[in-house]
Structure formats: structure tokens, C-alpha cells
Image (cartoon, rainbow, N blue to C red):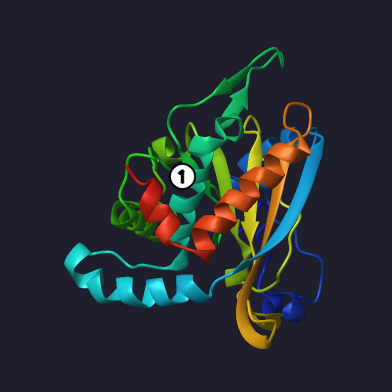
């Protein structure tokens, strides 16, 4: 999910015969406050597409080990790990700004926030220390947060100290998104759905490719476009050729 509000199901709107007042509370009230602050930030946007062909093969192989590791392996843990590895090369994106806008604080821990849709609105818990976790540890932690958000039982500590946000809007449909930075963070990424599209291969022949659109936003007061472009290209290299991720793991 992305920083957009949860809405009533379509069928509930269709049944309304008169106006209905919905109190703003819970997660939605927190979102009102955070989004009001976030939209004061001058956003720099950048989009690119990633070929998921090799990643799809990798995920199929990893799913054979789900029982052994007691975790579900979706694409998100792999994307999270790729982003964390790229943040090591571009630490300015894994940062926050102080209240007076006098300092950028590059964070050593990669506490990657994941936007999640719930019956009461958007919630954005984070997976702490992604840079130290294995791929399966990231998957297990993501599973835990997804289960907790579905039950509306997110621990307050899971909502604190995020350093970078990812939003998987593709699970609901859509390709590109204009994500909103979660202040005081400096950047966010949004992931679209997998689309089968015609593309040219290395031999110049048209072939079917599994393509995903990535949309990035950064605080343009302290982040320049070249940095975002290089970061995006690094994430793309990891996801299009997962062996590059293995080479950079420590």
C-alpha cells in the first residue's frame, strides 16, 4: 500500500440512502497529522521499470524452503533487501532531518517502513535493522507485521524510528504512483503490479517480459535528482540480476 487513505467498500457506498458521518480516529487520525506535515515537503519524483523475469524464477526456488524457514516468501522481502543493499551505497537516502532543517542525520540502521492497508486506514510499521537481517528474517518480520496489521494489533514500537518507506500498491492494481514522503524521512518508493509487456531482448528480438514500474520520491531540499537516479539504477541492477545481491551481501 501507499500513503493514501482507506476507503469504505464500494458496496457500502451503494447502499447509502443518506449522508453518513465517519469520525476521524485511530490510524486515520495519525495519518491526517503525518500527511499534513509530509505535504509541506517539496517532492522530487523519479520513475523507472524493472524486469522481474529472473526475480520470478528466484522466488519460485525460494518458496520451496518456506516450511523450513517458517516464513512466506513474496517479492517484498527481496525488494526490501535490495533496497537496503542500495541504501548502503547511498546513505543520504536512509536519513531524517532535524526539526530546524539544519542537519541531515544519516541513519546506520535501515528501519524500512512498509505501508499497509487496514480496515481503519493506513498504517506504516517498519522492519528494523534490515541491513543486518537475512532474506528469510526479513520475510518472517514482514509476515508478522502483516498479520498484526490485519488484526489491528500493531505494537507502537513497530511504528517508531522508520528511516525509509516502501509502498506496494501493485497488490491492489496500478502501475505508477506519486508516493508521499513520510516526514521526517527523506525518501519513499512505490511498487506497481507485474505486467506482461513486449520488450527487446539482447539479440534485438521482441519477447514477453514481466515488468514492474517503480516510483520514487525524495525531499528535494536535501536530495538531488542524480542521487535518486543512481539509487534507482542500483536497485534495478539487484532485482534484474539477483546474483548481484549475493555478491554484495556481508
Q: Horizontally, is 248 left or right of 162 in the view?
A: left
Q: Quadrant of the C terminus?
A: top left
Residue 109 vs 62, above or below: the answer is: above
Task: Judge whether residue 196 can be spotted in this image.
Answer: yes
Q: Confirm whether residue 125 shows in the render.
A: no
Q: Which residue is mark 1?
A: 85
From this view, report whether residue 187 is shown above or below residue 28.
Answer: above
Q: Closest to the observer: 136 or 51?
A: 51
Task: Residue at 45% x, 37% y: name it.
Answer: 110
Q: Is residue 10 left or right of residue 161?
A: right
Secondary structure under the numbered disc 1 in the rendered image: helix
**Residue 93, percent from left and from top:** 61, 35
* Image point (76%, 34%), residue name: 224
Q: Position of residue 181 (x, y in %)?
A: 68, 41
Quadrant of the image containing the N terminus = bottom right
Of residues 173 and 203, which is closer to you in this image? 203
Which residue ends up furthest to the left in the rendered image?
68
Number of labels in the image equals 1
| Crowd around label 1: few <14 · some 14–19 · many ≥20 (10 Å) | many
- Seen in the picture, residue 28 relative to 70 is either above or below; the reply is above
> Could you tell me residue 78's position as x and y percent?
43, 59
Tell me the quarter of the picture where residue 201 sits: bottom right
**Residue 27 location in percent, x, y?**
57, 47
Amino acid at each position: 500500500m501507499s500513503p493514501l487513505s482507506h476507503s469504505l467498500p464500494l458496496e457500502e457506498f451503494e447502499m447509502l440512502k443518506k449522508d453518513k458521518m465517519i469520525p476521524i480516529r485511530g490510524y486515520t487520525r495519525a495519518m491526517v497529522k503525518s500527511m499534513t506535515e509530509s505535504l509541506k515537503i517539496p517532492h522530487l519524483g523519479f520513475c523507472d521499470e524493472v524486469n522481474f523475469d529472473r526475480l520470478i524464477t528466484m522466488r519460485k526456488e525460494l518458496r520451496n524452503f518456506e516450511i523450513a524457514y517458517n516464513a512466506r516468501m513474496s517479492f517484498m522481502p527481496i525488494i526490501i533487501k535490495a533496497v537496503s543493499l542500495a541504501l548502503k551505497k547511498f546513505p543520504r537516502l536512509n536519513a531524517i532531518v532535524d526539526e530546524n532543517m539544519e542537519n541531515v542525520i544519516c541513519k546506520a540502521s535501515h528501519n524500512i517502513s512498509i505501508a499497509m492497508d487496514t480496515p481503519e486506514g493506513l498504517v506504516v510499521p517498519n522492519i528494523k535493522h534490515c541491513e543486518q537481517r537475512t532474506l528469510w528474517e526479513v520475510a518472517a518480520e514482514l509476515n508478522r507485521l502483516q498479520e498484526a496489521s490485519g488484526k489491528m494489533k500493531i505494537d507502537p514500537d513497530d511504528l517508531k524510528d522508520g528511516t525509509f518507506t516502501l509502498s506496494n500498491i501493485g497488490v491492489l492494481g496500478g502501475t505508477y504512483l506519486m508516493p508521499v514522503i513520510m516526514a521526517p524521512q527523506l525518501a519513499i518508493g512505490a511498487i506497481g503490479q507485474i505486467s506482461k509487456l513486449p520488450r527487446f531482448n539482447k539479440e534485438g528480438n521482441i519477447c514477453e517480459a514481466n515488468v514492474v514500474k517503480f516510483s520514487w520520491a525524495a525531499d528535494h531540499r536535501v536530495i538531488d535528482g542524480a542521487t535518486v537516479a543512481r539509487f534507482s539504477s542500483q536497485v534495478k541492477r539487484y532485482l534484474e540480476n539477483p546474483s548481484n545481491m549475493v555478491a554484495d551481501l556481508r
